[in-house]
Image (spheres, grey):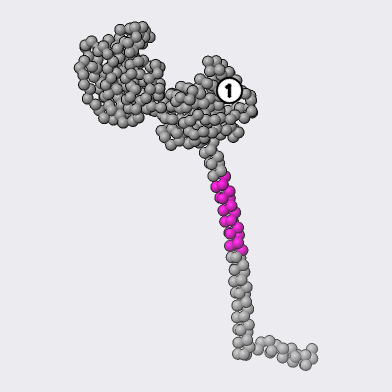
Amino acid sequence: MTLEGRKADSGRGDQQERPATPAEQRRNSALERKRTAAARSKNKSGRKRAEAAARRQAAKQRARRRRLLIATAVVLVVGLGTAGLIYATRPPAPPSISVSGAFGTKPTVTIPKINPPASLHAQHLISGHGTLVAKGDLAVADLTAYTWNGTATKKISQLSTGQPQPLTVGSTISGLDKSLEGSRSGTRLLITIPPKDGFGSKGNSSLGVSGHDTLLIVADVLGSYQKTASAHGTHETVNGTGLPTVGTSSPGTAPPVHIPQTAPPAALQVHTLIQGTGPVMKKGKLLVAQYEGVIWRTGKVFDSSWKRGVPAGFQIGTGQVIKGWDDGLVGKRVGSRVLLVVPPADGYGKQGSSQAGIKGTDTLVFVVDILGTY
């Protein structure tokens, strides 16, 4: 190597090892700060983009959860609503059946020339707000009834009397019992009853119903009475000697009757024990009552609605009951308790009633609570 070459190498070495001047140091520091700041800015921008992306992803997840919850809620509401409709109401009768007329009056019914429905239907044409009808109650209803077989229909005159009828709920035909139960006084029902819920495969020949007949009934529910129904009003003092005495009892049970050890009176005796304030019983009207009958001679009870656990209904003043009832109860007010002492002539007469243990010479004693009239 030449001398010039060694000098050149020596000069380059001196230049590499030479320390930077203050000015160069300041420039280098500035450059380093810029690089650091740029790196920080880049990192910060990356973090922001990452956070924004995370927020967008979280929002999407929340939206998906909301949609899922809303869909679930809709399913639950629809499901519960359907269940409520299924169990709270019965399916309506075919809409082509037409019923017109005011509640409590004879309805006009138009039945289409179609086959009847195969299942039990009960539709509230008018919803009442009175006493609830329960199994075991005495319901009072106006009925208009038809047989329906194929496209042929016929009114059942024995049921379509135009007069209020007493019905012990749970003791009529199954379809009518089910339809009345849970309704309220003031309700008009349109009921279609297939044979299996009516009179069955044997039908009812006395009513002209065959084993293939569906029944169509319009029922106006006029009233309902529980077994605990009783007289309510002002207690009265009974004047007269030699008469039975009547005690008190809890609702739903008969009051005790004490027969004196004397001969019975020869004429009909009518005494109000509790004075009611309801409507007056009129001849030809339906009487709803709780009652008990006792034979004076033996002191034994021979008939009692209280013991049967349901009030009874009778048309009064028309000969459907014994003369003592017709003569003694017409003119009395609903809510009253009445004592009747009935001689044989106003009772079962000379023939008596052997199945009840009543002789032709027996005087009868009745305690009657008048609950309603229609």
Magenta stretch prevailing secondary structure: helix
Q: Which residue is drawn at 52% across and 38% down?
A: 84
- Taking depth in this image into account, of 149 and 101 the one nearest to the observer is 101
In the image shown, does 69 or 262 lie closer to the viewer? 262
User: In the image shown, does 258 or 136 lie closer to the viewer?
Assistant: 258
Q: Is residue 131 left or right of residue 2?
A: left
Is 22 left or right of 251, judged from the image as shown?
A: right
304 in magenta: no
The residue at the point 24 percent across, 17 percent down is 244
Residue at x-position 58% and y-position 59%: 58
Quick one: label 1, few (<14), some, or many (20+) residues within 10 Å?
some
Range drawn in magenta: 53-75
Residue 107: give x, y in percent of width and height: 52, 30
Question: Camera-side residue: 337 or 356?
Answer: 337
Question: Would residue 304 be visible to someone looking at this image?
Answer: no
Whether residue 56 is visible, yes or no, is yes
The residue depicted at 21 percent of the width and 21 percent of the height is 239
Give the amino acid at mark 1. Lys
Residue wearing tag 1 = 154
Residue found at the far right of this picture? 2
**Residue located farthest toward the left when viewing the structure as drawn:** 241
Where in the figure is residue 271, as x and y percent of width and height?
A: 26, 21
Quadrant for residue 117, please give it: top right
Q: Position of residue 131 (x, y in %)?
A: 41, 33
Q: In this view, does 355 lie above or below 96?
A: above
Regarding mark 1 in the picture, which secondary structure is present there?
strand
40 lies above or below 173: below
Q: Quarter of the image for the C terminus: give it.
A: top left
Q: Quadrant of the N terminus?
A: bottom right
Residue 152 location, x and y as percent? 62, 23
